[in-house]
Amino acid sequence: MMGERVRIAVLGASGYTGADLVRLALTHPRIEIAALAANAKAGQTMAQIWPHFAPYPNLPRLVKANEIDFGSIDAVFGCLPHAASAELLSTLTGPRIIDLSADFRLKDADTYADWYGGAHPAPGLLPEAVYGLTEFAREALPGARIAACPGCYPTAVLLALLPLVAAHAISADNITVNALSGVSGAGRSLKEANLFPEVAEAVHPYGIGRHRHMPEMEQELSSRAGKPVTISFTPHLVPMNRGELVTCIVETPHGPDYLREVLADAYTDEPFVHLLPEGVAPATRMVRGSNHAVINVFADRVPGRAIVIAAIDNLVKGSSGQAIQNFNLMFGLPETMGLEQAPLFP
């Protein structure tokens, strides 16, 4: 667009992912935040909902989504719950769409219905959607009308495992993943399980045996393995605001050094995915507030197994940061633009 600013609308700006999207977009040199929508909060300013936006009084006031003139918008970021996202976005014909919900991630409408409890709101759009795990979608994103941003858990798991599965360095038949996520991953809506006394000083598993991110991970792993892949996946809620760490137990005829070589070859030139030095364990504090991901491989004391660990910020690389990374590629911009922030520590 030859230096022009790209006018964006953010739908669902009152949620955690929407607010982090706005935070990142504020410093993006080619983005103009033209409209912000949050139906339940329409009429309010971002600063009234999010005090950290007080220094930015010129942000658009929140409106209902149907009040936006989408004819003047170049790109829409959908930060809405599943079903609601596709229902609204399916009515748009002009702007390009970067969707952060689950609605366009699964290629099969029947699989979506099975895991999300209802028929897909816009199955005709599924063939147009590119699964936006950026590092593995660069060729498709520039021509895409819809980028389906991966879930936070799949982002971490797939970054850790896709190169290994594609290289047949690990068995695709027996993968076990234990995952930890901060409470922001559950969204901002009021839920008893997310109250401070419920989550503080405690860790608890949820979605045991059937978490909605499982078919998404299996879809992408199967495409690289060339055969159906079924994984064991157990997520856990931990008492921190943001951050995500996944521990993947894999079977392999190779030692951890070979797996590290495969990951090094895959990510040597990546701006945001980093293989840590040998023996250094990934931790959420390494990536907090940033679009970076850190990965490493360790030997398991059980012969024929290895442990692959990855950490991301669930709201940035696992959501809004990856969305902007996809946006950059869709609009022919440098992939790292607006995402150069270093991690926050402590």
Image (cartoon, rainbow, N blue to C red):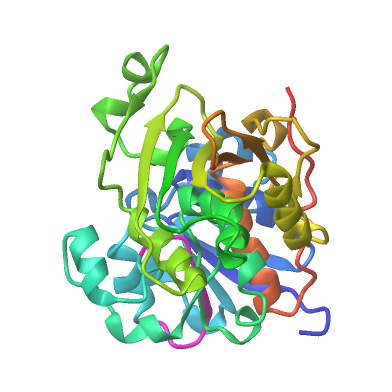
Residue 226 in view (yes/no): yes
Residue 121 in view (yes/no): no
Residue at x 39%, y 53% (from the top left corner): 42
Residue at x 55%, y 45% (from the top left corner): 315
Residue 195 in magenta stretch? no
- Residue 302 to residue 273: above or below: above
| Residue sitting farthest toward the left | 118
- Residue 174 to residue 67: above or below: above
- Residue 51 to residue 157: above or below: above
Q: Position of residue 196 (x, y in %)?
A: 37, 18
Front residue (pair 214, 79): 214
Residue at x 70%, y 70% (from the top left corner): 328
Q: Quadrant of the C terminus?
A: top right
Residue 101 in magenta stretch? yes
- Residue 33 to residue 95: above or below: above
- Quadrant hosting residue 63: bottom left
Q: Quadrant of the N terminus?
A: bottom right
- Quadrant hosting residue 92: bottom left
Residue at x 48%, y 32% (from the top left corner): 182
Q: Looking at the image, how many numbered discs can be counted on the residues?
A: 0
- Left or right: where 14 falls relative to 206: right
Front residue (pair 344, 134): 134
Front residue (pair 171, 185): 171
Q: Main secondary structure of the magenta part?
A: loop
Q: Position of residue 329 (x, y in %)?
A: 69, 74
Front residue (pair 220, 253): 253
Q: Position of residue 207 (x, y in %)?
A: 27, 40
- Left or right: where 209 falls relative to 53: left
Residue interval drawn in magenta: 91-102
Q: Position of residue 124 (x, y in %)?
A: 31, 87
